[in-house]
Amino acid sequence: MAQIGFYINQSLCQGCKACTVSCKDKNNTNVGINFRRVYSFEEGTYMQKSTGGIVQNVKAFHLSISCNHCVSPACVLNCPTGAIVKRKEDGVVTIDQDICAGAQLCVKACPYGAPQYDENKFKANKCNFCIDLQETGEDPVCVATCPMGAIEFGPIEELKKKYGEIRQIKGMPSPTVTNPNIVITPHKDAIL
């Protein structure tokens, strides 16, 4: 099986956070722990014209992101117990909760904020691409619940052929750090 990844059509994302809520519900995570997050970016101002009217150059866009199941995941390299592994069959990065010692080095290492530390369990966890749902033929919950159809998943090479090679928008770290398996159709105001 090929490396799987996410496609995010940022130009469709309305920032509703249905993906975040469904992921949170499926994984039963505590307050403050979100395996999928939606970030809102806002910039610009309103200016008064000399004629009395108002002109605006306000821009806003959203980005839904979770673990990118990177080619070179920083979390795997920084895990002192070997609890984090990249599966050979599909490239999904998982954290074995029985092995995780809660050192939080993965949390600090990931440029995308994917691993989340649970202070009640003293362990880190993250998006596992809903592999349990995929094994029964279902889509990951974030994909299934996005009302705009802004999130897709599949073999990353197929997603690249279909949607292009963009993996970074304004506000994101360089993809050269971990080589994330994500493709983005950027919002017009998010293009680098």
Image: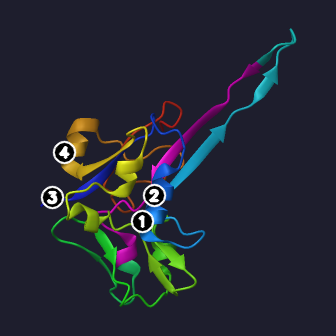
Q: Nearer the viewer, mark 3 or mark 1?
A: 1
The answer for how far apart the CA atoms under marks 3 and 2 are is 26 Å
Please identify the quarter of the rendering in which residue 178 is found.
Answer: bottom left
What's under tag 4, amino acid-wise?
Answer: Glu
Tag 2: amino acid: Ser
Query: x and y percent of residue 176 in the render?
Result: 37, 56
Can the viewer see residue 35?
A: no
Relative to 135, 77 lies left or right = right
Residue type marked 3: Ala
Which amino acid, mark 1? Lys
Give the residue at mark 2. Answer: 22
Asked which secondary structure carries label 2, the reply is helix
- The earlier-in-sequence mark between 4 and 1 is 1
Q: Which residues make up the magenta segment?
A: 55-76
Judge by depth and name the residue closer to the eye, 140 or 11: 140
- Above-or-below relation of 71 to 160: below
